[in-house]
Image: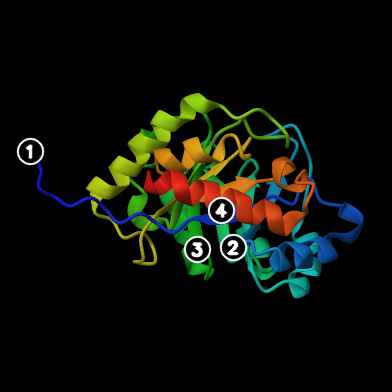
C-alpha cells in the first residue's frame, strides 16, 4: 500500500461564462461579474467549425478588458488555434485553453502559449480519454474536462464525467507534476454546472467550476449565485 500523503485540495474557483450575458453591454457585464466576486471570467471562443456556433473575436475581448481586473481565460473551441494564440493574449487573456482534439502538435501549441506569456491549459471533450493529456501535464496549469459537448450554453450536465474527473485528479496527483507555473494543476469543468450539479463535480476533484446559464438565473443576483455555488463546491470538496 502506498504511503504517499493525499494531495492538498486545490482552492475552489467560480468562473462565469459570458455566453448568457447581454452582448450589447459586455464591458458592463464583466464589471458586474467582478463585483459579484468571481475568480476569473471565461470567454467561449467558437469558430462555427470545431463547434456549431460563432462567438467572440479578440477585438471584442480587448474592448472589455479595461472594465475588469479579474483574470480572463479564453476557451478556444476552434480548429487550428495556433495562428490566433497571440491575438488572444494581446487582447488581455491571461490563460488560453486549447482542445487536445483540435491541434496537431499539442506540445508545440502549449509551449507557444507559455512563450507568449499566458498560462497554458488543455481541454478534452466528453468522449476523449484522459490519456490524451497524460503526457502534457508538465506543460499546463489546468486541464478542462468538458461536462457537455461544446458549442452551446444551457446544456444538461453529463454526470458520467465524474469518474473521469476523479481519474484525472488521481493521475495529476500521482504524476507529482507542479504544472507549467510550478504552483500545481487545476481541474476545470464546464457545462451544465448549477446548484444541483456543482457538488458532484467538486467531490470528484474539480476545483475550477464554470457556470453560465445557471449563474445568470439566480433570482437574487450574481453575487448571491457566486456565493451559493462556491459554498456548495467547498462543502462537497471537503466531504
- Left or right: residue 219 versus residue 11 is right
For residue 21, say whether it is visible: yes
- Left or right: residue 153 versus residue 207 is right
Tag 1 or tag 3, which sits nearer the N-term?
1
The numbered mark at residue 39 is 2
The numbered mark at residue 230 is 4
Report x, y in % for residue 235.
46, 48
* Front in this rendered view, residue 64 or 38: 38
Q: Which colouring convention does the figure follow?
A: rainbow
The numbered mark at residue 119 is 3
The quadrant of the image that shows the N terminus is: top left
- Left or right: residue 201 versus residue 196 is left
User: SS class of the residue under badge 4?
Assistant: helix
Report the mark closest to the observer, 4 or 2: 4
Q: Residues within 10 Å of mark 1 (few under 14, many from 20)?
A: few
User: SS class of the residue under badge 1?
Assistant: loop
Q: Residues within 10 Å of mark 2 (few under 14, many from 20)?
A: some
The quadrant of the image that shows the C terminus is: top left
Tag 2 or tag 3, which sits nearer the N-term?
2
Report the mark closest to the observer, 1 or 4: 4
Measured in 3D between alpha carbons, the distance from the residue under mark 1 to the one under mark 4, in whole angstroms, is 34 Å
Measured in 3D between alpha carbons, the distance from the residue under mark 3 to the one under mark 2, in whole angstroms, is 15 Å
Amino acid at each position: 500500500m502506498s504511503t504517499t500523503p493525499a494531495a492538498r485540495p486545490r482552492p475552489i474557483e467560480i468562473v462565469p461564462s459570458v455566453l448568457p450575458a447581454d452582448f450589447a453591454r459586455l464591458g458592463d457585464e464583466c464589471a458586474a461579474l467582478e463585483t459579484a466576486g468571481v475568480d476569473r471570467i471565461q470567454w467561449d471562443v467558437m469558430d462555427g467549425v470545431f463547434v456549431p456556433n460563432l462567438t467572440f473575436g479578440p477585438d471584442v475581448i480587448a474592448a472589455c478588458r479595461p472594465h475588469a481586473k479579474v483574470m480572463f481565460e479564453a476557451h478556444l473551441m476552434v480548429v487550428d488555434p495556433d495562428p490566433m494564440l497571440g491575438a488572444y493574449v494581446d487582447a488581455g487573456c491571461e490563460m488560453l485553453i486549447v482542445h487536445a482534439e483540435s491541434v496537431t502538435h499539442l506540445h508545440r501549441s502549449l509551449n507557444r502559449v507559455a512563450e507568449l506569456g499566458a498560462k497554458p491549459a488543455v481541454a478534452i471533450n466528453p468522449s476523449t480519454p484522459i490519456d490524451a493529456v497524460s503526457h502534457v501535464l508538465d506543460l499546463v496549469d489546468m486541464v478542462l474536462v468538458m461536462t457537455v459537448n461544446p458549442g452551446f450554453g444551457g446544456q444538461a450536465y453529463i454526470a458520467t464525467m465524474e469518474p473521469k474527473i476523479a481519474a484525472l485528479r488521481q493521475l495529476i496527483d500521482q504524476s507529482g507534476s507542479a504544472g507549467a507555473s510550478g504552483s500545481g494543476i487545476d481541474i476545470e469543468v464546464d457545462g451544465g454546472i448549477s446548484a444541483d450539479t456543482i457538488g458532484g463535480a467538486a467531490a470528484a476533484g474539480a476545483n475550477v467550476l464554470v457556470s453560465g446559464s445557471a449563474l445568470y438565473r439566480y433570482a437574487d443576483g450574481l453575487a448571491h449565485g457566486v456565493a451559493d455555488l462556491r459554498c456548495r463546491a467547498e462543502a462537497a470538496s471537503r466531504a
